[in-house]
Amino acid sequence: MSKPYNSYAKYLKNKFGYRIKKISIDGGFTCPNKDGTKGRGGCIFCNELSYTPGFSVKDDIVKSVQNQITNDNHRYIAYFQTNTNTYSSKDDLIEKYDSALSASPLIVGLNIGTRCDCFQDYVLDIIVEYAKKTYLTIDIGIESIYEGTLRIINRGHDYKSVVETLNVLSDLKKTHNVSFDVCGHIIIGFPWETKNDQMLYASEINKLSIDHLKINNLQVVKNTKLAEMYKEKPFNIFSADEYIEFVAGFLSCLSPKIVIQRLAAHCPKDLLLYPKWSISKFDFYDKLDIFMKENNLFQGSKYSLTKASNPLEKDSFTTNPDGKILI
């Protein structure tokens, strides 16, 4: 059944002719927002155990890859997912990327998750070299288009830096005549943002130099600062039906050229506090497809009508005298 949006699965099938699966890898990297370079503790929503697969063996990349190859009829993309995977020395990055690509002949691509402030010149050189020899995707955590939100979540960089890095990567492709995909990652549902604030993400994303997009609904995960905030003062979180309706409208405003890699977050049940949706991952996507088709919505159906946003104007959100966010 065709999707009412530009799906990643279809994109990969058209590109390779095979079903493609991602192999998640913990390369043993850290993050400048955790080790003191930019900050301590990381983002308020981050618990790396919530997105580190149990079958990935830290620092044993070959074993991690081989553990996850389950079907010789499929092809696989090695996905460095945990923490900031361009945040290391040149030699270390090359050794780890090469280990992943050489672990199996079924590996057809490399996916590197990172953040906008970890692109030293040697990282850009590495990107060019790997783009020449494999299918390469660079994932960049945008998280929010609002400066106020980026400060609240302790992101450690501003939105301007995101835009600048995306433009550098776009120029890199042209200058060196190489091809690689850039995927942006955003989170929808921060409680201090209004629904209108959140819908404006679409018009801003349309202006960015990205090829793919991952959208996560906000989740409250154990052992995070966000969990402490929720315990102190619970806030509204999207129900499954509310989020399906929101995403349907969001996609209708999004450029049809952008490939959709993900539309909802998926955290291990033992770590997830809220929301406790009663539907599975697969049911979510089925219900979204049905909702969009019943309402004659598809990705880009309202694209030309989308009003351009100016996120940098929203520099702060309402606070109490003690500096706490009003939720």
Image (spheres, rainbow, N blue to C red):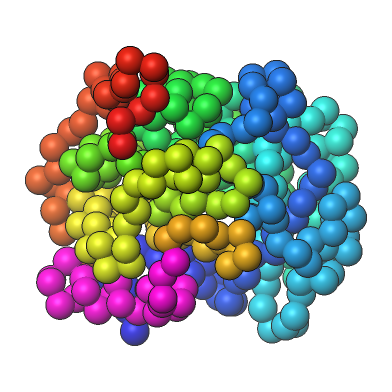
Residue under the image location 44 percent in, 27 percent down: 152
Q: Is residue 254 magenta?
A: no
Against 299, residue 74 (above or below) is below
Relative placement, left or right, of 306 versus 270 is left
Q: Main secondary structure of the magenta part?
A: helix
Q: Magenta residues? A: 276-297
Relative placement, left or right, of 29 versus 259 is right
Q: How many marks?
A: 0
Report whether residue 308 is seen.
Answer: yes
Q: Quarter of the image containing the N terminus?
A: bottom left
Residue under the image location 71 percent in, 62 percent down: 53
Q: Examine the image and state in which quarter residue 264 appears.
A: bottom left
User: Residue lying furthest front in this view?
Assistant: 232
Q: Quarter of the image containing the C terminus?
A: top left
Q: Examine the image and state in which quarter residue 224 appears.
A: top right
Residue under the image location 18 percent in, 41 percent down: 196
Seen from the viewer's position, the closer of residues 204 and 103 is 204
